[in-house]
Amino acid sequence: MALKSNSADGRTRSSVQIFIVVGLCCFFYILGAWQRSGFGKGDSIALEMTSKTGTDCNIVSNLNYETHHAGEAGSADQSESDTKAIEPCSASYTDFTPCQDQKRAMIFPRENMNYRERHCYPDEQKLHCLIPAPKGYVTPFPWPKSRDYVPFANAPYKALTVEKAIQNWIQYEGNVFRFPGGGTQFPQGADKYIDQLASVIPIKNGTVRTALDTGCGVASLGAYLWSRNVIAMSFAPRDSHEAQVQFALERGVPAVIGVLGTIRMPYPSRAFDMAHCSRCLIQWWSNEGMYMMEVDRVLRPGGFWVLSGPPINYQNNYKQWQRPKEDLQAEYEKIESFAKLLCWKKISQKGEIAVWQKSTDDSPCRARKEDASFCSVEADETWYKKMEPCVTPYPDVSGGEIKPFPERLHAVPPRIASGSVPGFSVETYQEYNDKWKRHVSAYKKINKLLDTGRYRNIMDMNAGLGGFAAAIESNKLWTMNVVPTIAEKNTLGVIYERGLIGMYHDWCEGFSTYPRTYDLIHADGVFTLYKDKCNAEDILLEMDRILRPEGAVIFRDEVDVLVKVKKIVTGMRWDTKMTDHEDGPLVPEKILIAVKQYWTTDGNSTATE
């Protein structure tokens, strides 16, 4: 009798489990049908994400949406009723940049471009509203069409079409801007210009992978380097050339608002294989060579510096440039003397293009010790660190040579091989990469759009060693890898050694970009890291500012943290879905997926009642 009772109990439990699975499938089928009746652009994306995962019973059986949170699940449901709705900002804030605000900049000194640097609003003056998209905003064109065309409504500024008309920067055609690929120094197009550089610099074989374009304009150089398998970090100030960085990001090209002024650039030492300036208006000859020394800090040993335009070939161009020959000659001679001090060798000068190469080690430079002042500040300390006219010493331990790209993406980086990153060996580095391959594989099951090219501009807010970016790497997308300034380990140098790009940032402040510039944001452990450091709502509002309408966010964190995040973003016009860790419901770390609804200043929205 006891055996029969146990058998009956087993059949009952089995029947209940089958009933639950069937019930979940039916529920998500009905949910998908209900969403199909919506009319908004954001709803269609949420539908695609939900329907592709929700109606797949093999996936649903492993993902229990908020069902394994014990007390938290009930409290989350109860808190929905008192979720705070965050109101939209006024239409005048459509292109608001909290740390590069034009009006606020005017109160700071103009010397050495200080007023164009980061000057964030204090906490008591921060906005606590949602930045609206302009009327008529649409999803950018997919890459590579986005390289050449940007919807006018997304960045409605025509000034550059007039100011740079003869230089082929940008043209206005109906309801779109067209980018012919020209520039001040390459009116015949960036491709022909890059061909000139490639005759001197090893661009074709993967030796040059990471590039820094200073004073980038609309980033046409970076846009066309992409087809050569070179990824450029482009920057330009927010100044009278309205929206140049915004245009770059709308095109799908990596760029940030920035300037060489009084503080160090937010990049690690030895990061870039090539640095470039094409009429970038930076006074390289001034401040005792301080700006060239800063480029030297971020330039990898053996890297290249390209200077195109004044004062190169001043002998033949001073009349055309309408400048005194003597002034140009003095500038040129100072640049040459600073290059010699930095141990750079000029390897080419043709027309107005000059190329120098940094020495691979300090052996040819030892004689300069009597003339050079060496930096006392650690080479990777950059966040609000004052720039000084000093030379960055070569590292004591190199860890070996960097492989050509794409091999270097998965090879052991020199900083790992040399033991420069505490807690990481070659073995633990490989384990780390395997872990992120599993994570990204799980993401792709949740959001089937990750591999389609739907998300071009991607940000990882807490990038670690670049595992997420390496696992998702594709010619359809790029990732801005952010290493928080409060992170326990400084890993940004490793990210660059892998052939990826990124920067340092403190998420208690606004990021150096325009609104609506990223399609997908990945936030791994960000809110645990910043617990008690600053307000979580402020971080989420900044994420909302830089995320495009219909953009997606992947949060990975402890469940109690994500429940609080979910409560806040529910009041920010985001749709959310919580899932278990790929290793099962008993793992306390969960994944929260969010999609930002489409809405604009004129009230057009995908929100449903």
Image (cartoon, rainbow, N blue to C red):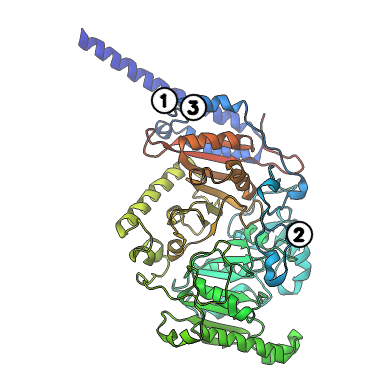
- Residue visible at 51% across and 48% down? 522
Residue denoted by label 3: 73
Q: Secondary structure at mark 1?
A: helix
Q: State the quadrant of the C terminus.
A: top right
| Mark pair 1, 2: CA separation | 53 Å
Q: Amino acid at mark 2?
A: Tyr
| Numbered marks: total | 3
Q: Quadrant of residue 424?
A: bottom left
Label 1 Cα crowd, 10 Å radius (few <14 / some 14-19 / many 20+): some
Between disc 3 and disc 1, the foreground one is: 3
Residue denoted by label 1: 21
Between disc 1 and disc 2, the foreground one is: 2
Q: Residue furthest top?
A: 1
Q: Position of residue 593 (x, y in %)?
A: 52, 40
Q: Earlier in the sequence, mark 1 or mark 2?
A: 1
Q: Position of residue 2 (x, y in %)?
A: 21, 9
Q: Amino acid at mark 1?
A: Val
Residue denoted by label 2: 157
Q: State the quadrant of the N terminus.
A: top left
